[in-house]
């Protein structure tokens, strides 16, 4: 049974029922859950990131949920190290582990490892941030394209965070995106299987609308207002928070 999955990863769109399925499987497998949502890891973000309820969190132990502060941001590399350590512990003690979340980069880092990137100086990071602040997405896209015309074969052009990260690494390393992507990390040592949730789009949109209404009723506006002093942090560019500041 060498290839029997030890890691069960659940993916799917927002409001598709990932949390409920993860809870069900974790109970059936008598194991615990590791979250790979890059925003649910933050203690200060609750309603707007649809963090599982206290009852759900109490019913099955969760890891990487409300585990970090927005003042000490987590990245994919740090997440991978933490999640792999906990997953190994659970597999050895429980036989398996359930992963659930919505950040594909974090899941990919966990399963496949990460490229080894160069250190980025504060000066480069500041330059990239200022370019984005002054020129928007178009500015950083053009800057990255000037360094590597083929960069968007690998990088999502409409994702500012990915573009900024790629631009930082290109300037720090002097390499094109395709070159620094060749240095792949090591895959996780235990076999895994990914399960995707799919559903009718009309039904999904209805579920999303209901979730947004519930978030407002639960006090999302007050949650965002309480974090107003931190609105310029990259973490606070999260969907569901950034729109409120203009409002």
Image: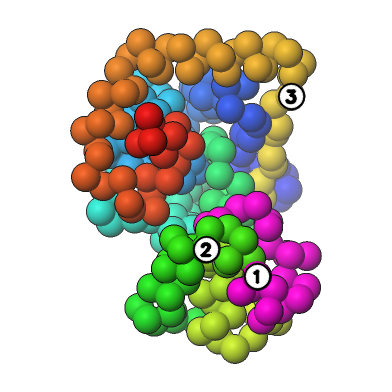
Depth check: 148 or 45 in front?
A: 148
**Which residue in the structure is indicated by mark 2?**
135
Whether residue 224 is visible to the viewer of this picture, yes or no, is: yes
Q: Tell me which residue sits at (43%, 26%) in the image.
A: 50
**What is the x, y in percent for residue 80?**
48, 57
Drawn side of residue 44 relative to residue 16, left or right: left
Drawn side of residue 87 relative to residue 25, left or right: left
- Badge 1, how many Cα within 10 Å: few under 14, some, many 20+? few
Whether residue 114 is visible to the viewer of this picture, yes or no, is: no
Count of labels shown? 3
In the rendered image, residue 146 lying in the magenta stretch gets the answer yes
Disc with the residue nearer the chain's start (3 vs 1) = 1
Position of the N terminus by quadrant: top right
Q: CA distance from mark 2 to mark 3?
A: 37 Å
In the rendered image, residue 73 lying in the magenta stretch gets the answer no
**What is the x, y in percent for residue 56?**
39, 19
Q: Tell me which residue sits at (60%, 53%) in the image.
A: 159
Bounds of the magenta segment: 142-161
* Residue 6 tag number: none
Depth check: 97 or 120 in front?
A: 120
**What is the x, y in percent for residue 174?**
59, 89
Disc with the residue nearer the chain's start (1 vs 2) = 2
Position of the C terminus by quadrant: top left
Furthest residue toward front:
134
Callouts 1 and 2 close, C-beta under 8 Å:
yes
Which image quadrant is residue 102 in? top right
Q: CA distance from mark 3 to mark 1?
A: 36 Å
Disc with the residue nearer the chain's start (2 vs 3) = 2
**Which residue in the structure is indicated by mark 1?**
142
**Which residue in the structure is indicated by mark 3?**
198
Q: What is the secondary structure assignment of the residue under circle 3?
A: loop
């Amino acid at each position: 049974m060498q290839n029997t999955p030890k890691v069960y990863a659940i993916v799917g769109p927002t409001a598709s029922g990932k949390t409920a399925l993860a809870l069900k499987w974790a109970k059936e497998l008598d194991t615990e859950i590791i979250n790979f949502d890059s925003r649910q890891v933050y203690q200060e973000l609750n309603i707007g990131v649809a963090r599982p309820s206290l009852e759900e969190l109490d019913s099955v132990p969760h890891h990487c949920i409300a585990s970090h502060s927005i003042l000490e941001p987590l990245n994919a590399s740090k997440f991978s190290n933490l999640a792999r350590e906990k997953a190994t512990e659970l597999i050895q003690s429980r036989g398996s582990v359930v992963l659930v979340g919505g950040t594909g980069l974090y899941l990919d880092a966990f399963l496949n490892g990460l490229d080894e990137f160069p250190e980025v100086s504060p000066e480069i990071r500041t330059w990239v941030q200022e370019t984005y602040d002054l020129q928007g997405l178009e500015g950083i896209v053009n800057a990255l394209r000037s360094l590597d015309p083929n960069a968007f074969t690998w990088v999502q052009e409409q994702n500012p965070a990915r573009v900024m990260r790629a631009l930082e690494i290109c300037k720090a390393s002097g390499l094109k995106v395709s070159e620094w992507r060749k240095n792949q990390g090591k895959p996780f040592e235990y076999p895994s299987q990914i399960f995707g949730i799919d559903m009718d789009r009309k039904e999904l949109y209805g579920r999303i609308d209901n979730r947004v209404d519930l978030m407002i009723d639960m006090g999302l506006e007050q949650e965002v207002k309480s974090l107003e002093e931190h609105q310029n942090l990259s973490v606070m560019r999260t969907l569901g928070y950034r729109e409120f500041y203009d409002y």
